[in-house]
Image (tube, rainbow, N blue to C red):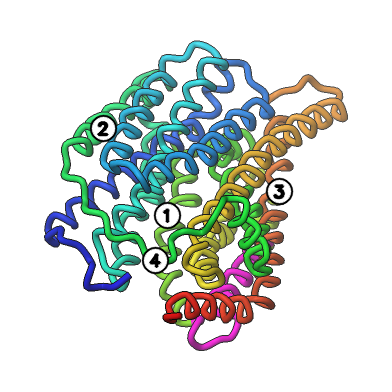
Amino acid sequence: MNSALETTVPAPQARRVVFLLFLAMFLNYYDRTIPAVLMEPIRLEFGLTDTLLGLLNAVFTVTYALFGIVLGRLADVGVRKTVMGMGLIAWSAATALSGAATGFGWFLLARVGVGIGEASCAPTAQSIVADLYAPERRSRAMGLVMLGLPLGLVAAFFTGGAIASAMGSWHAVFWLAALPGALLGGIMLMMKEPPRQAAPADAASGGIAQALRLVWAVASLRWLTLGAIGFGLAGYVGTGFMVALLQRYFHLPLIQAGIVSGVIIGATGLVAMIGGGWLADVLQQRWRPGRLGLTTLASVAGAVLTLIALCLPSTRVEWFVVLFAIGWLATYLFPVCAYPALQEVVAPRQRGVAMAVHLAVGNVVGGGCGVVLVGVLSDRVALASAQAAGQALDEYHRGVGLATGMLLIPAAMALMALATWQATRHFDADRQRAQDAASSLSTPH
């Protein structure tokens, strides 16, 4: 796209839109993280097993991934402020219904509603930013929008338990969280729709099946998609079960467990996003493996450190926090490094479907199946621990079971390391083929 076609939107208005998109991303991750913060009181009230908690996370993840494709297409052809505004109102209403649920079935259906609504956020935000800013300024604008991810996580972990304790009910957290989203959705509906840029000449890519075959033919992309499975598993398991682990295994109270989880899961994202992208760009220019080599090394270190942390006794919570937080940086460096690499190894007309496949496989296989697997493993180990001790199943054995189940996190990071290292072996050749394909399309015939 020619930078001369940047936008007819004045800079102050563009900045206001980016700020609204940041708020939407912040509320997106705040609302989706609340169940992870309140997992223990929800489990106790509804009498749930870890398998059912894993199913709850999986249903949300799969719904989010599948509807993301549908709503992403709608953002391409429809009025984006309407897609985003109605999505905000929908997921805020579903968040309020989560608080009103009196049983697991209704709570599960409400979280499905949240997943459908939130699926509108990321593709619509990316489309709007692409039309507001020229290519050389787009990454910085999108970076500001994406800051809503770690900040939303931190806010949810820091405030969720405190609000539940102050209000005397976990239900109230969902009701309060629904209000700002509904308000922001109304503001989105009233804002001016940003003008669309003309579609590039090579936008048409044939049928979906043909596009998928073209993407699958790229070796480095296949490996990066395998890495996305590990990334999805580690990310959703860590975010979904960290508060519960700190409460059960390390015996922290709810408020403290939420704050510590915010440091481990959320604050590390600020470090990785501020410094990780800069470091990846520098290495890409000075070291042949480049950014993929960086995420490989980070994933190896993450696998080792999180493995050590999860094997610590329950009395060493301070060492657990330090080791796991450093290791967790790998989960933020993966998208910072893998997504730009993915864009370079496919032709421009294939980038959308390549990213869609990458995200869908990572979310559905890694995130969806991974959280269920952790739940099943946790329940089985907890029961075996209780039987071996000749005792009834209690919170101690449930803590042992969950700590064991979360050993899938270092295994997932090891898979990320293997996949990204293998991708480096094919990256140069795949990038050259993509550049040749783009050149042939731009050459007059």
Query: What amino acid is at disc 2?
Result: Pro
Q: Position of residue 85 (x, y in %)?
A: 28, 35
Residue 26: image quadrant is top left
Residue 281: image quadrant is bottom left
Q: What residue range appears in magenta? A: 283-303
Q: Name the residue at 26% across, 41% down.
A: 81
Residue pointed to by mark 1: 267
Is any atom of residue 440 visible in this view?
yes
N-terminal label among 2 and 4 = 2
Mark 2 or mark 4, which is nearer to you?
Answer: 4
Please report contact status of discs 2 and 1: CB closer than 8 Å, yes or no. Answer: no
| CA gap, disc 2 and disc 3 | 36 Å
Query: What amino acid is at disc 3?
Result: Leu
Residue pointed to by mark 3: 408
N-terminal label among 1 and 3 = 1
Q: Position of residue 106 (x, y in %)?
A: 51, 15
